[in-house]
Image (cartoon, rainbow, N blue to C red):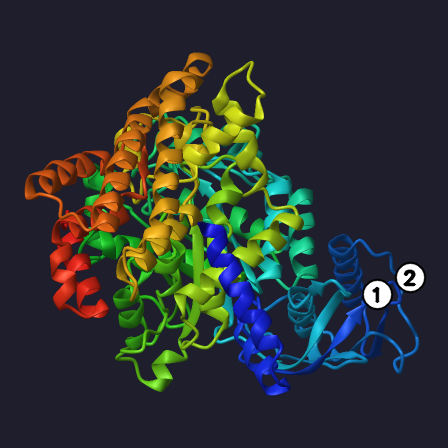
C-alpha cells in the first residue's frame, strides 16, 4: 500500500511535466531535494547534462582549500554517477561545465563572522558559482551536488537560479567524546556530513566525569589517568581541526568546569573540593566532584592547561561548560563556605561566577573568548561571553535582554530520541519572540547536542543523522521554511546522500539486526522479519532509558534499544496511510481495506515468527518477546477495526473498551523501546465504534472528532 502512494505521486508529476513550461517550473520548484532550503531559489527551463566531459574552471581567487573542495565534489559526483571525469581543473572558463568565480580566501581561521554567501546559476550550457569567499564555494558546491538528478536520458542538474546565505552564523553539532569515546573516524565522517548540510561548528565536549579526552603535554597525568588510554593526541586534534577548516567548519573545544570534572581529579585530587581519592566515573548522571575555586593551585593548573589548549585550538572561543554544579561538595567544605562569606560572594552561584571570572582572565590573556552553558550567566560576568542555552528559549532570551550573545541547544538534544519534526519546529528566535531587533542580533544560532551516554562509535551516526539535517535547515533557512511533510520528503533524500558520503546510520542498522538474529543465523528472511519489527519501534525518549536499564560505560550498546532508531519513517508512513483511509472523502474504501488487512496480517505474522521461531536461535531477542506479543495483538485489533469500518458494522462499546485497554498496555515501553504504530490503531478502533457519526459530519469534522477522542492521555 505504500507503493500506491508512490505511484500516485509519480503520476501527478508525470502529468504535470506534460503540461507547458510554466507547469514544469511549478512542479519542479515544489519538489527540489535541497536541505537546507536556500534563501531564494527559482527554477528556469532547461537542464545541464552531467556527462564524462564534466569539468570545473576557477575564475579569480584560487587556493589549496578551494581546489581540494572541487576535487572532493568531483569525486562525489563521480561516485554518484558512475562517470569518470578528467583529472584536474580546466583552464577554459568558456567551455567548463562549472565555473567558480571567487573573490577571496575567507578568514585564515574559520570564524563566526565569515561570509558564507553564494549564488549559483545553472543553465543548459553551464553552471556558474559566484562567491565572495572560499567558504561560499564550500556551501555552494554542496548545493550543486544536492541538485543532481537523473532520468532515462542520464544525469543532470536542473536549470536554476539560487542566491543563498545563512540565517544564523553559528550552526553547530556538539559531540560528547567523553562519556563514550568517539575516535578520529567518527569525527571525520561527521564533519563530512556536517559540511553537506552547511553546519559550521563542531563543538567537542572533551572532558567529563567519565573521561579526559585530550592530550596535555604540560600535565600528561590528566589524560593518562583520566581516559583509559582513549584520548586525542595533539597531533590528531590538529588533523581534525585542519579537516574541519578545509570544510569551512570551526572546532570549539569544551573543557567542562568546575563540575563534571571527576576525570581531572583522578590525577589531581588536591584540586577537588573534597579530599578524594577519585576514580573515573562509570555511571550516568550528575555527580558531586567539583574543582575548588578557593584553591590557587586550581588556577595555576588551568593557566597552564588552558594556555596549552588555546595554542592548540585556533578558534576564537573556548567553552568552559559550567553546567549542573549542584555544589554539594562546596556545601560540605567549611573552608569553601568561609571563602564565600569573606569575599561577599553570597552563595555557590556567586562562587562559580568568581571562578568563571578567574578563568575568563586566563582565556583573555590567551586571546580567547568564553562560551559556557546557561549557568555561567551572572551579573558579575562581562558582556562579551556567549551563553549556550540548554535550559530553553526563555533562558536564551533573558540573556539577550541583558546584552549577552547566545546560541540555543534546548530543543536540539538529539540524544533524547525525539522525532525530527520537533527539533525542526524549534526556532532560536520564534515568531512570537519578545526580543527587539537589536536583541535578536545577539542570538547567533544553535547547536544540536549529541550526548554520548547511549551511543557507541557504531550507533552514534544513527542518532545524529538524518535528524540533524533538519536542525541544520532550521539554522540556515528562512524562518518560514517549516513545512514538516516537505522536510521529511527532502530528509529522506539527504539521508541517502549522507549514506553515500560514509555515514553509518543506515549501514550499521543491517549489522545490528543481523546480530540480533543470533550467533549462527545468516538467513535473509529471518533478518528481514526482524527488520520489519525493529522498523516500527523506537528507543524510549527523554531520560527514560536510564531508568529502565542499569548501564555503565562498559555496557555494550548492541541491544534492541540500540538497533532501534529515532523517528521511524515506517511509522510515519503508516500513520499517513491510516489517515488517508480514515479521513478522506471516500473514507473506509473497500479495496484499500484489503491492503490494510494484508498489512496487519503481515505484522501479525512478524510478531508470531519472532515469538515462535526466531527466538529459538536468538537469546538477544528475549527482551523483545513482550513486544513481539504486543505486535501480534495490535495487528489483530487493527485488522478487526478495518473490517468493521469497511463492512459498515458498528463495533460495540465493549469491543472498543477492551481493545483500547490492550493498546494502552502495548504502548508502554519495554526493553527501553516502544512500538510507535499504536496511535493510528487507536484511531481505527475508536472510528470503528463511532462510525455512525461520520454520516452527519464533514470529513474535517470527523477527523477532528476522532483525533480528539483518540488523543493520548497527558502523562
Ligand atoms: C547539559 O545538558 N547539562 C548542558
Q: Provide the secondary structure element on which disc 2 rests.
A: loop
User: What secondary structure is marked by label 1?
Assistant: loop
Residue in front for this viewpoint, 70 or 491 = 491
Image location (x, y in percent) of residue 197 = 57, 62
Q: Is residue 1 left or right of residue 37?
A: left
Based on the displayed image, in which of its 4 quarters is residue 40 positioned?
bottom right
| Of labels 2 and 1, the one closer to you | 1
Q: Is residue 379 left or right of residue 13?
A: left
- Residue 257 visible somewhere in the drawing: yes
Q: From the top left corner, tell me how far across and down residue 291 is, in percent.
A: 35, 42
User: Which residue is at the far left?
Assistant: 654
In this view of the protein, which residue sits in the foreground, 233 or 426?
426
| Mark 1 Cβ and ligand 1 under 8 Å apart | no
Image-quadrant location for residue 208: top left
Which residue is painted at 59% across and 87% down in the image?
22
Question: Mark 2 or mark 1: which comes first in sequence?
Answer: 1
Residue visible at 55% across and 66% down?
11
Asked if ligand 1 lies within 8 A of label 2, the reply is no
Q: Is residue 298 above or below residue 63?
A: above
The residue pinned by badge 1 equals 51
Q: Residues within 10 Å of mark 1 (few under 14, many from 20)?
A: some
CA neighbours of label 2 inside 10 A, class few (<14), some (14 to 19), many (20+): few
Measured from the top left, where is residue 712 in percent x and y? 17, 50
Q: Please tell me whether residue 189 is drawn above or below residue 54 in the rendered image.
A: above
Where 212 sits versus 4, above or below? above
Label drawn at residue 253: none
Q: How many marks?
A: 2
Query: Does the rendering let one see residue 370?
Result: no
The quadrant in which residue 580 appears is bottom left
- Residue 86, label in figure: 2
Residue 437 at what x, y percent from top left? Answer: 36, 85
CB of mark 2 within 8 Å of CB of mark 1? no
Amino acid at each position: 500500500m505504500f507503493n500506491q502512494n508512490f505511484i500516485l505521486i509519480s503520476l501527478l508529476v508525470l502529468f504535470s511535466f506534460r503540461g507547458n513550461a510554466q507547469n514544469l517550473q511549478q512542479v519542479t520548484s515544489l519538489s527540489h531535494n535541497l536541505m537546507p532550503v536556500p534563501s531564494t531559489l527559482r527554477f528556469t527551463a532547461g537542464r545541464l547534462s552531467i556527462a564524462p566531459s564534466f569539468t570545473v574552471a576557477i575564475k579569480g581567487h584560487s587556493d589549496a582549500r578551494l581546489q581540494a573542495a572541487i576535487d572532493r565534489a568531483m569525486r562525489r559526483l563521480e561516485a554518484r554517477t558512475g562517470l569518470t571525469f578528467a583529472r584536474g581543473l580546466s583552464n577554459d572558463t568558456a567551455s567548463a561545465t562549472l565555473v567558480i568565480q571567487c573573490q577571496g580566501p575567507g578568514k585564515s581561521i574559520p570564524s563566526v563572522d565569515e561570509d558564507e554567501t553564494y549564488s549559483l546559476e545553472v543553465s543548459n550550457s553551464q553552471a556558474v558559482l559566484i562567491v565572495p569567499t572560499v567558504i561560499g564555494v564550500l556551501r555552494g558546491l554542496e548545493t550543486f551536488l544536492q541538485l543532481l538528478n537523473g532520468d532515462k536520458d542520464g544525469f543532470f542538474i536542473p536549470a536554476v537560479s539560487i542566491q543563498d546565505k545563512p540565517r544564523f552564523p553559528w550552526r553547530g553539532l556538539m559531540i560528547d567524546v567523553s562519556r563514550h569515546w568517539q575516535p578520529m573516524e567518527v569525527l571525520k565522517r561527521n564533519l563530512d556530513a556536517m559540511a553537506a548540510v552547511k553546519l559550521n561548528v563542531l563543538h567537542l565536549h572533551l572532558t567529563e566525569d567519565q573521561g579526559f579526552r585530550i592530550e596535555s603535554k604540560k600535565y600528561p597525568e590528566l589524560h593518562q589517568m583520566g581516559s583509559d588510554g582513549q584520548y586525542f593526541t595533539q597531533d590528531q586534534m590538529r588533523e581534525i581541526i585542519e579537516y574541519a577548516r578545509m570544510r569551512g567548519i570551526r572546532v570549539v573545544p569544551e573543557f567542562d568546569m568546575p563540575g563534571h570534572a571527576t576525570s581531572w581529579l583522578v590525577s589531581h585530587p588536591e584540586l577537588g573540593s573534597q579530599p578524594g581519592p577519585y576514580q573515573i566515573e562509570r555511571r550516568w548522571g550528575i555527580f558531586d566532584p567539583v574543582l575548588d575555586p578557593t584553591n590557587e593551585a586550581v588556577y595555576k593548573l588551568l593557566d597552564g592547561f588552558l594556555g596549552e589548549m588555546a595554542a592548540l585550538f585556533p578558534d576564537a572561543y573556548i567553552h568552559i561548560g559550567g553546567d549542573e554544579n549542584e555544589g554539594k561538595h562546596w556545601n560540605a567544605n567549611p573552608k569553601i563556605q568561609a571563602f564565600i562569606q569573606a569575599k561577599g560572594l553570597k552563595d555557590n552561584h556567586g562562587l562559580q561566577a568568581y571562578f568563571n571570572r578567574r578563568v575568563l582572565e586566563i582565556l583573555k590573556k590567551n586571546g580567547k573568548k568564553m562560551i559556557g552553558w546557561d549557568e555561567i550567566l551572572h551579573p558579575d560576568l562581562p558582556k562579551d561571553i556567549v551563553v549556550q542555552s540548554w535550559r530553553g528559549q526563555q533562558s536564551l532570551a533573558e540573556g539577550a535582554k541583558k546584552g549577552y550573545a547566545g546560541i540555543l541547544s534546548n530543543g536540539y538534544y538529539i540524544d533524547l530520541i525525539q522525532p525530527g519534526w520537533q527539533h525542526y519546529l524549534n526556532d532560536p528566535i520564534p515568531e512570537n519572540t519578545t526580543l527587539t531587533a537589536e536583541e535578536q542580533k545577539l542570538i547567533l544560532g544553535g547547536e544540536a547536542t549529541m550526548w554520548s551516554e547511549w551511543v557507541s562509535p557504531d550507533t552514534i551516526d544513527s542518532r545524529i543523522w538524518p535528524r540533524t539535517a533538519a536542525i541544520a535547515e532550521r539554522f540556515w533557512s528562512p524562518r518560514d521554511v517549516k513545512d514538516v511533510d516537505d522536510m521529511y520528503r527532502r530528509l529522506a533524500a539527504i539521508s541517502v546522500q549522507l549514506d553515500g558520503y560514509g555515514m553509518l546510520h543506515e549501514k550499521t542498522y543491517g549489522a545490528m539486526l543481523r546480530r540480533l538474529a543470533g550467533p549462527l543465523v545468516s538467513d535473509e528472511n529471518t533478518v528481514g522479519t526482524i527488520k520489519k519489527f525493529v522498523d516500527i519501534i523506537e528507543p524510549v525518549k527523554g531520560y527514560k532509558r536510564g531508568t529502565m536499564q542499569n548501564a555503565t560505560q562498559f555496557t555494550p550498546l548492541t541491544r534492541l534499544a540500540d538497533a532501534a532508531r529515532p523517528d521511524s519513517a515506517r511509522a510515519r508512513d503508516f500513520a499517513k496511510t491510516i489517515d488517508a483511509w480514515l479521513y478522506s472523502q471516500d473514507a473506509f474504501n473497500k479495496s484499500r481495506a484489503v491492503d490494510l488487512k494484508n498489512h496487519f496480517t503481515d505484522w501479525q505474522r512478524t510478531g508470531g515468527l519472532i515469538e515462535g521461531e526466531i527466538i529459538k536461535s536468538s537469546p538477544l531477542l528475549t527482551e523483545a518477546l513482550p513486544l513481539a506479543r504486543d505486535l501480534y495483538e495490535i495487528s489483530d485489533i487493527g485488522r478487526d477495526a478495518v473490517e468493521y469500518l469497511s463492512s459498515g458494522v458498528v463495533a460495540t462499546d465493549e469491543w472498543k473498551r477492551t481493545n483500547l485497554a490492550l493498546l494502552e498496555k502495548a504502548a508502554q515501553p519495554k526493553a527501553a523501546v516502544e512500538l510507535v504504530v499504536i496511535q493510528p490503531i487507536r484511531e481505527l478502533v475508536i472510528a470503528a465504534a463511532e462510525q455512525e457519526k461520520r454520516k452527519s459530519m464533514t470529513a474535517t469534522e470527523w477527523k477532528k472528532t476522532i483525533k480528539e477522542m483518540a488523543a493520548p492521555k497527558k502523562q
